[in-house]
Image (spheres, rainbow, N blue to C red):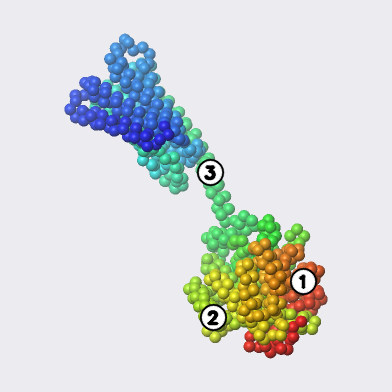
């Protein structure tokens, strides 16, 4: 049957006939005389309810689906039972003692009901894993219950103590066993789901329980010869049939098995084990005594199995806890572990002189990762972890927070020690790493926080150190900053800042100023170009780009800002210079066809020639969208606008990649220049950048040259162009004309 609506209709219809029949039977109980057989009531109504109950289940079985077989078995069991009733009504009840040979057919049909129902339930329970903890608990509890019931029956039921011969004893035993199994099944059903049971399942459990209780009561009464037909007891079987039919109408959701880990869950199972132990020790007599002993044995075996599962669970929980506290890649404690440290270490963590926490973030690791492959990036992180670990003092704790962020918790004896610790970490990273024979220099920014508390509160310390680290990152690579309480603009401040930036830009950009820093020839000071560097005037102070560009980006204002800088810088150089050039920084996200249009527009508007403009882009632009970026840069160069690769070396574009890039020159990142005379590998890398640049005919510029030492090193390597405080700090626009007039263009 494919159509659920038709099936439901049929089920409801059959059920609707069964219910009034049951009511008729029930109402008859008020007026009838017990023990007098009423064919219409005990024959038609009673058997009718049982038969219709069974028939209600049939459409559900015909609907198929994953539980189809289960329903079919349930219907079969009920039909077998109903057939037993029909046979009893028609033949059995009028049969004389002499005619009864062997096991009567109605008994065969009734007894067949039990195994078929057990099978039905097995199928209906479907996906509950056979070693499910709830299932095992339920089996142990049911086992204990079976033991108790069997012992009680053995002692209280005269029939069980053999009153009517060997054969009848076996038959009675089978019935009672079947009933006990039904009780167990009912308990199992709700126990497996920890009593959080959908209505359909409640009805099945209720159906089995009603049947078993009616049956057991029947056997107890008959063993005292006290059972008479036509009493309230008979209703038990009818209720059972209606419950099972009702379950078929409601349908069953797949069983869910919530795991209960609390101790309360163990109590019933422990009781069951105790009862079983007692039953085995005491060894009850008689056939049901034997049954009780077997049930006790089975219960104990099951409880051992359950114990085994519990032990495995405990081990797994411990392993999970270990994993939750460990960083997979480096094997270091992770952020959770760091947070939990005071709790986990207890008293051993106390330091009378306080603590310092350093958060360390590798500079531009994202780019390194993108250019090296993730596998190599991972190796680099592991190597970093090893190096950092190598410079810890006893009692320091190194953790990996996430990605390229590490944290070190250090015992302090005086506040300056924190800084010394950070410098030690920095020194550990100084030597470039070697990945597949290629040296990879890494720098890191660090943020420090400290506390005098003997036991550190990790949360606040981490937050402060993290803020300080981000503050350091904004200022430049390789910096260490201590938390001072000033660094974090609150989110309200940030929103205010964005609003001011937006309104200042809208108002024409008068609040933005450009300063210009020359790029000069190392040997004779001839001028290549002036780099336009933007500043924001706010409340009389000049805010450097590092402090507001992030907000510009977040507020989506990079386009109007770049427009402003381009227009103003090109106009200024055209107005004030005599064939001079200006370089303008363009953020990676803007290296798109928009830039091309904007540059054309700027040049048209100012009337400046294309060679007066140089665009500076960073490697990020080329890593993120290499094809688009390259195309745009190529088109710019076709226009006659030059392109410089800014901060080269820091972004890990890879040396060989430069070959395919549409650029006119490279600006070697300040991180290299700053270490050139301290560090041999850095010098070697810089040398190869210069060689490559020169062999490709590129203009190679050293940026951020602060002193004569750096200048000399660069010169020795063959660098022809430089920029930096050693020559000029960025100069305000007001001084531009004077500067340009003294420095003719090359
Ligand atoms: P950049 O393009 O690499 O600019 C060089 C930065 O290094 C400038 O910082 C400059 O003042 C600084 N600098 C120059 N010589 C030295 C030196 O000898 N030692 C040290 N320590 N620093 C030196 P500034 O002006 O704070 O700009 C920072 C960054 O902000 C720039 O780095 C650039 O990426 C960005 N930026 C500046 N103006 C603009 C702009 O108009 N648009 C965009 N998108 N970015 C801009
Ligand atoms: Mg620049
Ligand atoms: Mg730069």
Circles 3 and 1: CB atoms closer than 8 Å? no
Closer to the chain start, of discs 3 and 2, is 3
Residue 237 vs residue 417: left or right? Answer: left
* Residue underneath mark 2: 508
Question: Image point 29% across, 30% down: which residue?
Answer: 18
Which quadrant of the structure image shows residue 429? bottom right
| Residue 452 picture location, percent across and down | 55, 72
Circles 1 and 2: CB atoms closer than 8 Å? no
Up the image or down, 586 lies above or below 320; here it is below
Question: Image point 38% across, 30% down: which residue?
Answer: 58
Residue farthest to the left, as pictured: 31
| Residue 722 picture location, percent across and down | 74, 78
Q: Is residue 64 visible?
A: yes
Up the image or down, 738 lies above or below 239; here it is below
**Secondary structure state at the residue bearing disc 1:** loop
Which callout, 3 or 1, points to the residue nearer the camera? 1
Give neighbour class at mark 3: few <14, some 14-19, many 20+ (Cα, 10 Å).
few
Give neighbour class at mark 2: few <14, some 14-19, many 20+ (Cα, 10 Å).
few
Up the image or down, 128 lies above or below 559; here it is above
**Secondary structure state at the residue bearing disc 3:** helix
Residue 105 vs residue 620: left or right? Answer: left
Q: Name the quadrant of the C terminus.
A: bottom right
* Residue underneath mark 3: 311
* Residue underneath mark 1: 698
Residue sitting nearer the eye, 145 or 198: 198
């Amino acid at each position: 049957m494919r159509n659920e609506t038709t099936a439901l209709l049929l089920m409801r219809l059959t059920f609707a006939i069964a219910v009034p029949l049951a009511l008729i039977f029930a109402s008859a109980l008020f007026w009838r005389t017990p023990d007098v057989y009423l064919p219409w009531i005990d024959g038609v109504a009673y058997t009718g309810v049982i038969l219709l109950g069974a028939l209600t289940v049939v459409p559900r079985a015909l609907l198929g689906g994953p539980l189809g077989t289960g329903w079919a078995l349930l219907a079969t069991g009920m039909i077998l039972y109903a057939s037993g009733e029909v046979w009893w009504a028609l033949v059995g009840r009028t049969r004389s003692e002499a005619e009864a040979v062997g096991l009567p057919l109605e008994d065969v049909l009734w007894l067949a009901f039990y195994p078929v129902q057990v099978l039905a339930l097995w199928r209906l329970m479907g996906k509950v894993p056979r070693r499910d903890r709830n299932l095992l608990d339920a089996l142990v509890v049911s086992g204990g219950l079976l033991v108790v019931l069997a012992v009680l029956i053995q002692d209280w039921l005269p029939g069980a103590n053999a009153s009517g011969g060997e054969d009848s004893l076996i038959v009675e035993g089978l019935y009672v066993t079947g009933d006990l199994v039904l009780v167990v099944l009912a308990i199992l059903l709700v126990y497996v789901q920890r009593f959080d049971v959908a209505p359909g399942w409640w009805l099945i459990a209720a159906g089995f329980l009603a049947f078993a209780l009616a049956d057991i009561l029947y056997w107890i009464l008959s063993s005292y010869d006290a059972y008479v037909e036509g009493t309230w007891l008979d209703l038990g079987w009818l209720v059972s049939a209606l419950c099972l039919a009702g379950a078929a109408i409601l349908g069953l959701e797949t069983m869910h098995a919530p795991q209960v880990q609390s101790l309360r869950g163990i109590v019933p199972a422990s009781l069951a084990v105790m009862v079983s132990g007692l039953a085995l020790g005491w060894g009850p007599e008689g056939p049901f005594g034997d049954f009780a002993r077997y049930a006790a044995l089975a219960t104990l075996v099951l409880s051992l199995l359950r114990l085994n599962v519990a032990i495995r669970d405990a081990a797994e929980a411990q392993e999970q806890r270990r994993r939750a506290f460990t960083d997979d890649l480096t094997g270091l404690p992770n952020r959770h572990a760091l947070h939990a440290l005071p709790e986990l270490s207890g008293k051993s963590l106390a330091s009378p002189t306080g603590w310092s926490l350093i958060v360390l973030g590798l500079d531009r690791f994202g780019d390194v990762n993108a250019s090296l492959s993730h596998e190599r990036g991972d190796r680099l992180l592991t190597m970093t972890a090893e190096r950092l670990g190598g410079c810890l003092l006893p009692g320091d704790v190194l953790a990996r927070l996430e990605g390229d962020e590490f944290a070190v918790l250090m015992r302090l004896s005086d506040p300056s020690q924190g800084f010394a610790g950070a410098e030690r970490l920095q020194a550990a990273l100084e030597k470039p790493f070697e990945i597949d024979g290629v040296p990879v220099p890494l720098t890191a920014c660090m943020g420090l926080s400290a506390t005098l508390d003997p036991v550190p509160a990790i949360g606040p310390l981490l937050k402060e150190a993290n803020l300080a680290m981000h503050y350091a990152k904004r200022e430049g690579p390789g910096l260490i900053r201590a938390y001072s309480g000033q660094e974090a603009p609150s989110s309200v401040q940030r929103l205010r800042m964005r609003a001011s930036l937006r309104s200042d830009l809208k108002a024409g950009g008068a609040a933005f100023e450009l300063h210009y820093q020359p790029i000069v020839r190392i040997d004779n000071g001839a001028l290549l170009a002036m780099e336009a560097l933007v500043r924001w005037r706010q409340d009389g102070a000049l805010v450097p780009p590092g402090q507001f560009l992030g907000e510009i980006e977040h507020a989506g204002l990079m386009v109007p800002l770049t427009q402003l800088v381009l227009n103003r810088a090109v106009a200024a150089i055209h107005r004030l210079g005599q064939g001079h050039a200006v370089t303008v920084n363009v953020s990676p996200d803007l290296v798109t066809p928009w830039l091309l249009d904007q540059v054309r527009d700027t040049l048209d508007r100012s009337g400046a020639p294309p060679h007066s403009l140089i665009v500076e882009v960073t490697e990020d632009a080329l890593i993120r969208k290499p094809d688009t970026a390259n195309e745009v840069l190529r088109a710019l160069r076709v226009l006659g606008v030059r392109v410089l690769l800014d901060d080269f070396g820091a972004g890990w574009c890879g040396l060989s990649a430069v070959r395919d890039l549409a650029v006119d020159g490279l600006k070697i990142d300040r991180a290299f220049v700053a270490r050139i005379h301290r560090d041999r590998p850095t010098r070697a890398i810089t040398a190869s950048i210069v060689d490559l640049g020169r062999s490709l005919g590129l203009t190679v510029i050293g940026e951020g040259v602060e002193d004569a030492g750096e200048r000399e090193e660069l010169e020795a390597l063959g660098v022809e162009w430089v920029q930096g405080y050693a020559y000029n700090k960025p100069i305000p626009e007001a001084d531009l004309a004077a500067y340009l007039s003294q420095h003719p263009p090359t």
